[in-house]
Image (tube, coloured by chain):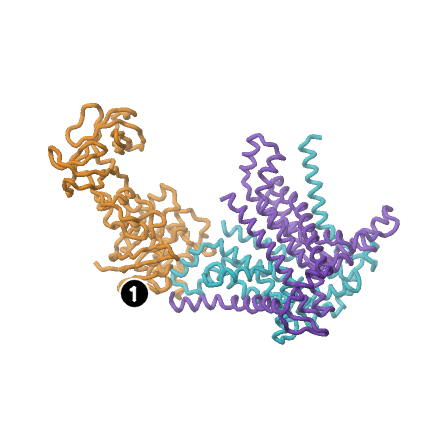
């Protein structure tokens, strides 16, 4: 390769390479180093020990939060899939006019552009003890006094997070459904297979990669969320990100926070890796 | 009722419910910004613009708004300057470590923002850099790089390599090729991802939370206001942000439509 | 005549795969050379190295006496017509054609004039302001051509330029390309996998396989005297058979699927070789009788109707051969099972070299 070309390539390459190295690779590396440090009140000192990790997996306080976060992320993804799938299915297979289809698609994707914080906040105003839902139910006489069952619990959090992350579920499912050749469904109908069986044996299996992609995205986003728990979650609604944040705030235990963040990173990365493998398995089908 | 008719009715009801789930909360947000009562309860009591007037008089809020604008514009510019060459490099150049580079740069899409936030917090602390809006800008640019890279990269992949080769073949230098051929053809993706990056930065909390110094951005301001309690003022800010989002959505749909007609 | 391009021991490897394997080739000024071969034979890689889009692993390329091996495409006086045309979608037809002059800093008015001139050469001067996506396939092809010749390159490279067109248009464009070549006196190097295209247009055909040149020569040379069974099979069809040359009553003989015919010149008794003859070179006669010397007897096994001729598959007992029968009007169609005799003169038989493992 001649010199001038090499120089040009270097010019294109070096800013992004430098940037990713300095602001992504180095910080993750320092995070790793910090996770081995030790807390010495009121601050922390360099060390090489696994105490933080041991604490995370033995102290039920942390371990339970991780399990709870996994559970909530799972239910949010499941709930989002249950709402998103029929919606995407309707758009692809039942809506005939392309204009209407685009409009309905945009209707579900557009909220992504609207502030996440506000979308979570509005649920708080709706579900609150003195909130709109309670006062509405009282004014209609269904409730005689405000109920606190709506807010500050895990259900409220799951509903809010489904609401916030549902576009990430609709997009990939819509994309795979759109790619399923209509001829496949017709062929199945042609063979005398009923609609329910056609759905179960043709459409659903073919849309699994999209469900997996949406599930992964929703799961990972929920897993790292710390705003919804703060707004609508109660005392039992703390998630791992809240615990991490408090290590860097009030608790001032950065090494433990770093270790928790790395555990979170590992969980997210393994989920992405597994789902990647899964999607690749599915890709061969149309080839 | 015939089976197909009842089935259609079931679909329509179901889809309407989903749309209601999506849009009722936003409608509630906007409606209560005009509600006369200070408390957010049913029934609504009357129409007022009081909350909007209070916003206009709230200096901390206006400062936060300008801070957010500063952060979002700077972060978007920075992320485009880094992201477009990154996408070009991923698409056109082979170099050692490309696999790692790709993974690293695309990671923040699925990675919780809090990890970017705290890892950069530790970096800045280690380097002795003061937390500030500028630190936030660097943080946002890093977290949003993935948005720009994925969108621009996807467009580049659809752009035949032969266009660039034809340009070089006809005597154009690398820069001429980039500005006369490549950029005009990925323009909509660059603008579109820039707009998305802007919106996301304007709205960002997890990274900002860890990296900001004394200055507040708008979402941080709203967040701290929320901690003190719910007020219709927040609904008023919210409604303005919704309005801004609608404008941006409209522009981005327009952009996509233009691209499609051009590529026919 | 002078050599405009000289290629010396050019090799290109992609990792462990050899794309082009030690090729040497020179092209005369004004010549129309076609690189012919199946996909993956290295012809496109060779063309792209001449254009500067691939860096050779070793070897040299001289353009008009200058070493351009490491010169980037933008600095080579060579232009290319791309397989997908590579028209810039955001520029009008006129701006596409004028692009090469504009980036060179030529004044606007002059660019316009030259672009119009080039478009006139391909008959599209009235589409100057059209957008590329409004043109038909054939028109796009012509714009790509105009854009590549506007800078008067020393060599014009064409990478499968007609492959995206349908059959009728392709034939028409073959004629136009050839005419343009004659009119401009430019050197053309064309890459194709279509033997008809190669035969119709070229001054010289270079047949490639596995990154190497198998044979080169004029279309007539290659068709009448293919050197190997690969060339014989790639350009036109050939009935091939292996035989030991024996001494017969009238001279040396070979066995074509068990039936003796006179051996061609150039082989001696006792030698074993691969032989072949073209389907249209056999003289076909129907009936049990016919024949005489050098005649193969068999029966019609299958009939493929081609319009101006029929291709018959003849069962010789120990094997099958193809022959072409011109349809001159009054003759009836042969039927499957008809007895037939084929006269194949010694001068019609080609001796084919054994393949070097490729």
Viewer-closest of A220 and B230? A220
Viewer-closest of A74 and C156? A74
**Residue lying at the far top of the rendered structure:** C288
The residue located at (49%, 44%) in the rendering is A287
Relative placement, left or right, of A194 versus B39 is: left
Give residue A87's quadrant in the image.
top right
Viewer-closest of C270 and C336? C270
Where is the N terminus of chain C found, in terms of image quarters? bottom left
**Residue lying at the far right of the rendered structure:** A144
Give residue C231's quadrant in the image.
top left
Q: Is residue B98 above or below residue B128?
A: above
* Colour chosen for chain A: purple
**Residue lying at the far bottom of the rendered structure:** B128
Under circle 1, the secondary element is strand
Relative placement, left or right, of B209 versus C223 is: right
Q: Is residue B239 visible?
A: no
Q: Position of residue A251 (x, y in %)?
A: 73, 68
The residue located at (22%, 32%) in the rendering is C258
Chain to which the residue tagged by mark 1 belongs: C
- Of all chains in the rendering, the one displayed in orange is C
* Colour chosen for chain B: cyan
The residue to which callout 1 is attached is: C67
The residue located at (64%, 46%) in the rendering is A104
Give residue B54's quadrant in the image.
bottom right
Q: Position of residue A261 (x, y in %)?
A: 65, 63
Q: Is residue B208 above or below residue C190?
A: below
């Amino acid at each position: 390769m001649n010199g001038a070309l090499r120089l040009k390539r270097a010019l294109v390459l070096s800013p992004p390479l430098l940037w990713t190295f300095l602001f992504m690779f180095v910080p993750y590396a320092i995070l790793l180093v910090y996770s081995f440090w030790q807390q010495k009140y009121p601050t922390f000192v360099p060390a090489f020990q696994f105490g933080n990790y041991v604490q995370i997996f033995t102290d039920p306080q942390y371990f339970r939060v991780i399990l709870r976060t996994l559970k909530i992320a799972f239910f949010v993804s499941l709930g989002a899939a249950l709402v998103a799938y029929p919606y995407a299915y309707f758009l692809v297979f039942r809506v005939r006019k392309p204009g209407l289809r685009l409009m309905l698609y945009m209707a579900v994707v557009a909220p992504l552009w609207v502030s996440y914080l506000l979308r979570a906040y509005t649920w708080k105003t709706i579900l609150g003890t003195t909130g709109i839902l309670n006062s509405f139910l009282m004014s209609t006489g269904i409730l005689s006094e405000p109920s606190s069952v709506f807010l500050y619990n895990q259900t409220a959090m799951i509903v809010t997070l489904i609401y916030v992350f549902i576009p990430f579920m609709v997009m990939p499912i819509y994309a795979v459904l759109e790619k399923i050749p209509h001829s496949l469904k017709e062929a199945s109908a042609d063979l005398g297979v009923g609609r329910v069986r056609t759905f179960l044996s043709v459409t659903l299996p073919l849309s699994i990669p999209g469900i997996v992609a949406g599930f992964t995205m929703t799961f990972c986003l929920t897993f790292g969320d710390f705003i919804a728990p703060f707004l609508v979650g109660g005392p039992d609604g703390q998630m791992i990100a809240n615990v991490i944040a408090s290590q860097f705030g009030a608790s001032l235990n950065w090494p433990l926070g770093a270790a928790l963040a790395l555990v979170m990173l590992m969980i997210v990365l393994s989920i992405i890796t597994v789902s990647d493998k899964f999607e690749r398995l599915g890709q061969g089908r149309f080839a | 009722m015939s089976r197909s008719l009842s089935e259609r009715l079931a679909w329509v009801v179901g889809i309407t419910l989903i749309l209601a789930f999506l849009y009722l909360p936003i409608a509630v947000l906007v409606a209560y910004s005009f509600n006369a009562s200070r408390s957010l309860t049913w029934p609504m009591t009357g129409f007022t613009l009081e909350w909007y007037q209070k916003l206009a008089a709230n200096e901390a809020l206006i400062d936060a708004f300008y801070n957010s604008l500063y952060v979002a514009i700077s972060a978007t510019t920075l992320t485009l300057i880094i992201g477009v060459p990154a996408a070009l490099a991923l698409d056109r150049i082979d170099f050692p470590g490309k696999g790692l580079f790709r993974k690293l740069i695309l990671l923040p899409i699925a990675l919780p923002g809090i990890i970017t936030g705290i890892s950069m917090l530790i970096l800045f602390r280690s380097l002795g850099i003061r937390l500030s809006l500028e630190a936030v800008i660097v943080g946002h640019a890093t977290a949003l790089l993935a948005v720009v890279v994925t969108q621009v990269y996807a467009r580049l992949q659809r752009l035949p390599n032969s266009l660039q080769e034809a340009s070089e073949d006809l005597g154009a230098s690398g820069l001429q090729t980039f500005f006369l051929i490549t950029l005009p053809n990925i323009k909509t993706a660059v603008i579109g991802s820039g707009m998305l990056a802007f919106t996301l930065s304007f709205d960002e909390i997890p990274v900002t939370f860890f990296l900001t110094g004394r200055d507040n951005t708008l979402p941080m301001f709203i967040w701290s206001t929320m901690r003190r309690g719910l007020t219709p003022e927040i609904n008023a800010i919210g409604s303005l942000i919704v309005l801004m989002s609608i404008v941006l959505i409209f522009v981005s749909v327009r952009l996509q439509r233009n691209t499609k007609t051009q590529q026919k | 005549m002078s050599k405009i391009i000289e290629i010396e021991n050019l090799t290109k490897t992609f990792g462990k795969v050899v794309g082009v394997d030690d090729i040497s080739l020179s092209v005369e000024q004004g010549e129309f050379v076609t690189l012919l071969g199946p996909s993956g034979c290295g012809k496109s890689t060779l063309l792209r190295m001449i254009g500067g889009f691939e860096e050779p692993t070793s070897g040299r390329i001289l353009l008009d006496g200058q070493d351009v091996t490491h010169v980037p495409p933008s600095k080579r006086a060579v232009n290319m017509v791309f397989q997908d045309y590579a028209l810039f979608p955001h520029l009008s037809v006129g701006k596409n054609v004028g692009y090469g002059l504009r980036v060179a800093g030529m004044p606007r008015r002059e660019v316009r004039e030259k672009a119009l001139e080039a478009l006139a050469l391909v008959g599209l001067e009235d589409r100057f302001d059209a957008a590329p996506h409004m043109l038909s396939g054939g028109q796009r092809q012509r714009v790509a051509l105009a854009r590549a010749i506007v800078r008067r390159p020393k060599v014009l490279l064409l990478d499968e330029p007609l492959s995206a067109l349908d059959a009728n248009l392709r034939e028409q464009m073959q004629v136009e390309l050839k005419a343009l070549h004659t009119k401009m006196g430019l050197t053309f190097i064309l890459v194709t996998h279509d033997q008809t295209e190669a035969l119709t247009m070229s001054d010289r055909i270079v047949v490639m396989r596995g990154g190497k040149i198998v044979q080169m020569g004029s279309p007539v040379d290659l068709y009448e005297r293919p050197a190997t069974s690969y060339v014989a099979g790639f350009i036109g069809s050939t009935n091939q058979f292996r035989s030991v040359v024996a001494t017969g009553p009238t001279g040396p003989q070979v066995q074509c699927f068990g039936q003796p015919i006179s051996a061609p010149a150039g082989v001696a008794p006792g030698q074993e070789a691969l032989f072949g003859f073209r389907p249209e070179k056999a003289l076909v006669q129907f009936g049990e009788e016919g024949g005489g010397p050098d005649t193969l007897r068999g029966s019609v096994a299958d009939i493929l109707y081609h319009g101006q001729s029929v291709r018959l598959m003849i069962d010789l007992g120990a094997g099958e051969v193809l022959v072409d029968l011109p349809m001159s009007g009054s003759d009836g169609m042969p039927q499957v099972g008809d007895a037939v005799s084929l006269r194949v003169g010694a001068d019609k038989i080609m001796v084919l070299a054994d393949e070097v493992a490729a």
